[in-house]
Amino acid sequence: MRPADLLATLKLVWQASSRHSLMYAATSLGGSALPAAHLYVGKLLLDEVAHATQGQATYPALLSLLAIQVGLTVLGSLLSTVQTAAQQLLGDSLQHSVSRRLLDKASGMSVESFENAETYDKLQQAYREVGSRPLGVATQLVGLAGAAVTLVSVGVLMARLGFWVLPLVLLASLPNVYVSNRFGIENYRMLRRQTHDARVQNYLGSLLTSDTLVKEVRLFGFEGHLLGRWREYYLGFRRQLDAMVRQRALWGFAASLTSALLIGLASALILRRAVDGQLSVGDFSVFILGIAQVQGTVSGFLNGLSGIYQNLLYMRNLFAFLELPDRDLDAGEEWHGSIDTIEFQNVGFRYPLTDRDVLRGVSFTVRRGQALALVGENGAGKTTIVKLLTRLFEPTSGRILFNGMDAGRFSPRSVQKEMSIIFQDYGQYQMSARENVAIAEVSRMEDAPGVDRAVEQAGAAYVATLPQGLETPLGRLFQGGRQLSGGQWQRLALARLYFRDASVLVFDEPTAALDARAEFETIEALRAQAQERLTVLISHRFSTVRLADQIIVLEGGVVTESGSHAELLQRSGKYAALYQLQASGYAGGQNPLLGQKDA
């Protein structure tokens, strides 16, 4: 446990709501003094009742003590009510505050951080505990102070009963606390070990319950395989749980037995003094009720210490995530005007903590009014070039120039405002059709004519047939949502690209989900756009690629060929081979998919 983490956690709580923090602490400490007051007034009341049986007490005296006892009960109820309300409001404020910090942090992290499994695990661990751990540390710390108040005040009353009584009762509280703390820490360690496997198991479960994957799962019939793997992970978790539960049960029984023997010894000493006439009926009630009070308070005190320790272990997950390096997207000079040229000069890229270059020595230049196409097999580095070009990644070697100036001089966010893109794994946002388009430029969310133009450019006229037109909620996540086909979603993604008035357009497989007619219409729209802007294309379809002014062929992160469609065909290299392979499927030649002549 790091003291710095404790201070940081308390700072989080205080900043979330100082008013409710103070209210919770005050009512908790005030209520902690009430158990001793109840015990003492109860002792006096029992002694008065004993005297009354002998004719030595008056009714008004009994009523006065009873009134005090009732008053203490009412006060306790009032303090508890205010304490509970303060805790609930503080918990809500704290959850919002910490969630906001996590989301702000995630928003400022680089894209490559999200592609790192270790970083993503830290994010999931931090987000999972956001609702309970910070509040747990604060309430347990206040609980420790309250337990100390209760223990001292009740201990003073019990100390009057005999020198050894209080130490024996205190010792009787320790065994169960030890067992609880030991296995609480072991449970934390077990959960940490299971983090990765639990993610895999959850993913397997999501495959079995996904509305988009159910067709493929049913068709190929691998439900049993997925369920079998899901159950293997469960059985692995269960074996660890079984072992821990058995050990905890044995240790728990031994702890309870030890506590019972110590309480029995303390009771024998009290009975000895009672026989000798050294204790009143009220004193004996203090002992009987005090045993439960002291044991509960000691247990709460030590469990509170353990709970703070355990919660701070989880808080370390949160702080470890918040301490990850940020990428300030606004750092650097602000870019102004359009991007007219993009030049890569011997650009290389390697993911952090890896020893393999994804790109090596990539060089090319593309100008406004030109279209650049990136061609290559999967994993060749095409999408990495796009991520570098759009400043999502920073090169590990070489330079990228915009209008002849080093791109690293300028803030990524200001440069990205001049770029619009459709990724191969484009977003399908569970929002209205209008929001799916206008979200590309949130400052123009109310630009209805702009949305209409973008929809028209993307050929997404089908939105007019939706129940509420552009206001129709999309997807199945929320009630009333309308699900679209893959091609329809892609049309909206294209409209999102066109909605932003950018000087650089990037198309990553822009026709992958479109039918033949839609593909033709999209290509024609791309031709028109390429005349005005700087365009970058990634596609496996040569009907799309051939419109580019310059085509770059990538193999293993290296540029192996470069030129126009006609020039590359004349060289009879890799590009020509790929083109002929795809063209044979349309020209009555050998069909590479069917393995036979086309009719």
Image: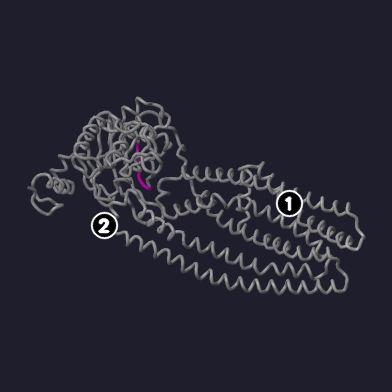
Foreground of the two, 31 or 117: 31
- Which range of residues does the magenta coloring cover? 396-401
* Above or below: residue 16 compared with residue 272: above
> Which disc is residue 31 wearing?
1
Q: CA distance from mark 1 to mark 2?
A: 64 Å
Q: Within 10 angstroms of label 2, few (less than 14), some, or many (20 or more) residues?
A: few
| Residue at the (66%, 43%) spot, across then down | 20
Foreground of the two, 71 or 99: 71
Which of the image's four quarters has the N terminus?
Answer: bottom right
Q: Looking at the image, tell me whether mark 1 or mark 2 is earlier in sequence order.
A: 1
Residue 398 covered by magenta stretch: yes
SS at badge 1: helix
* Above or below: residue 525 compared with residue 35: above
Q: Is residue 328 left or right of residue 162?
A: left
Q: Is residue 527 left or right of residue 175?
A: left
Q: What residue type is disc 1 on? A: Gly
Q: How many marks?
A: 2
Q: Is residue 556 left or right of residue 40?
A: left
**Could you tell me if residue 120 is visible in this image?**
yes
Residue 370 lies, in percent from the top left, at: 25, 33
* Above or below: residue 594 compared with residue 521: below
Location of residue 461 (image quadrant): top left
| Residue at the (57%, 51%) spot, across then down | 132
| Majority SS type along the magenta span | strand
Q: Within 10 angstroms of label 1, few (less than 14), some, or many (20 or more) residues?
A: many
Residue 261 lies, in percent from the top left, at: 71, 74
**Could you tell me if residue 404 is visible in this image?**
no
Residue 534 lies, in percent from the top left, at: 29, 33
SS at badge 2: helix
Q: What residue type is disc 2 on? A: Phe
> Which disc is residue 220 wearing?
2
Residue 299 lies, in percent from the top left, at: 68, 63
